[in-house]
Amino acid sequence: IRGNSPKGILWKLEGIEIPNPNHFGSTGGGGGNISMLSSSTLDKSDFYTGAFPAEFGNALSGVFDLKLRRGNNDKHEHSVMIGALGIEAATEGPLKINSSSYLVNFRYSTFALLKGVAEIEGVTPDYQDISFKVFLPTKKAGSFSVFGLGGINKSLRKPQEIDFVFEAFGPLYRVEEKGSVGVVGLSHQIFLTKKSYLQTILAATSDNYSNKTDTLDPHNKYLRGAVGRTKFLNTTYKLSSSYNNKINSHHTIQFGIILSKLGYNFNDQQYNPSTKNWNTNFNSNGNSIFYEGYVQWKWRLNNRIDIVPGIHYSALALDKTKSIEPRISISYNASNNQKIILAVGQHSRPEHLSTYFFHNSKNTQQDKFQDLKFAKASHIVFAYHKIYNGYLFKAETYYQYLFDIAVEKNASSFFSTINALSVYDLYNLDSSLISSGRGSNYGVDITVEKPFIKNWHFLVTGSLFKSRYSTYNGKFFPAKLDRGYQCTAIAGKEWSINKNERKRIAINGKLLTAGGLRESPVDQVQSDLQKKLVYVKDQYYSKQTPSYFRMDIGISYKINRPESTHTIMLDVQNIFNYRNISGITYNIQSKQSSNEYGLGLFPLFNYRVEF
């Protein structure tokens, strides 16, 4: 994903920004991500990468705009699935008011039912979530939709047997995490004329995360001792209103406003064994307002050329920072099956609120409130699309220049929020932050797709890219997520095994490969002297682990009956049991590094009945 970091992606549900655990500032415990939404509940969704339209703000690298589909307004339908990872149930159908409908999907973790029996990589996952949409049209007052999703999860990581082998090198850790996320909204759309409509959305979102970290002392009967306590709560109340008017066949205008009241309550304390004191990194609560407004104009110059200029405005009341972002795209239809697109624009987003209030007690001169600019990115994208004999081909080259990035105000530091994946990346800072960092992303994306026609399909996407960032002293280094390349291939085939085609079998496969993770070499001499982890100067993120590789295979058997459909599915993830490195840890005392590996071969069995 472009933008050097997942924090640059904006996730929206029904037009409202939703909590994203990949957002910088989150600590990974919340349940709010795309996996909470079953594919059966989603309508056509849009994914924008680079120079996206003016209606989208608060994002640097892309927008994932998700839409829940309407329920069936003709008859009631239900489905139940029991599988290795969870139990899922869905129901939809008409309501008695006009052509209204409902849609509900619920999931519960299988592992929660098998506590103490089933673990993945030493962690017992425990989750449940729900999503819903109620569609209520009226004859004169427009159409209303009530939508939402919510999820809770918790996990417990206990020391594994391998940890006890190395217990002489330091204490063992027990980590208990809990997270929850919730979104509820009301959407209203009304046609003012035959060519214009107004859409208004009211919504509330919340994500909550807590962490309890204890040590198990191997020299004192594994006695538990508290070393970390964290509680993060983010709430948002949002009003969004947009007006769209198709003036004629050549001109369409759209403008809107978005008002967000951001609430926060951050508390984090970590125990320092050397001083035997608790250090407070966060102790802040309050709220602020985030203002957004936009206008864009679609001008169909002729049957071949479309021009879409626009401008987006945003301001954060917390520190009175503002941003004005002009954007424009030009598309040329060279023929009925060929299109050329050129788009440029500027984009910005404030840092996560936790960044402004982080206070590291190692530096008493550091202000508790960090005065930062919006992180910004200038995009230019050139794309070519072609359809030939039912096959879709896309090629896109892009360049992104990032500036006003928060970096540590220290000439010897290599920290930049470009590389920060969670709030914990701030904890090793010795100085305050300043918005003087830069970065760049450039590369090419290629996609070849065959839709599901004549019972088979495939999709191949490949990316070659380069990501760089600068430190406070102005030097450039590879970004943490600069893998260099990424490729995904998906294919499937379906057969009928009887004459009336009521019994069908299908085989699907997926191949993923990408460049390895980037790490910095450790300077052991300086680490011993300073008694903390120190990396070799000017070799930051110069090392790269072996490439990522994974292949999944799935087989399904479907029986179609007049009143029901039964499907038996067997999916085998990582069929070659390839040991992909998911992280690297370094123990200063033992002077050894160890690799953390992702999931190996993992079979999944599911049974679904739809009726």
Image (cartoon, grey):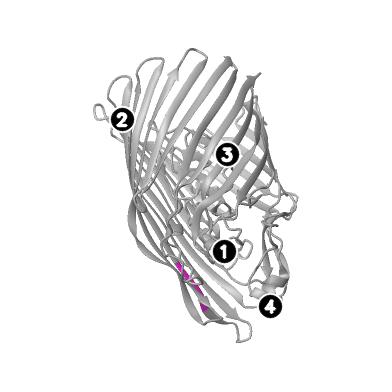
Question: Can residue 193 be seen from the camera position used here?
Answer: yes
Q: In 3D space, how far apart are the residues under numbered discs 2 and 3 (Cα atoms)?
A: 34 Å
Closer to the N terminus: mark 4 or mark 2?
4
Earlier residue among tags 3 and 1: 1
Is 223 inside the magenta-drawn segment? no
Mark-to-mark CA distance, 3 and 1: 40 Å
On the image, numbered disc 2 is attached to which residue? Answer: 198
Label 4 to label 2: alpha-carbon separation: 64 Å
Question: Helix, strand, or loop for circle 1?
Answer: strand
- Three-letter amino acid code at the position of disc 1: Thr
Q: Which residue is mark 3?
A: 400
Check disc 3 and report its element: helix, strand or loop. Answer: strand
Which contiguous range is marked in magenta? 226-230
Label 2 SS: strand
Image coords of residue 580 (percent x, y): 71, 54
**Sequence-first tag of 2 and 3:** 2
Residue 300: x and y in percent read 45, 17
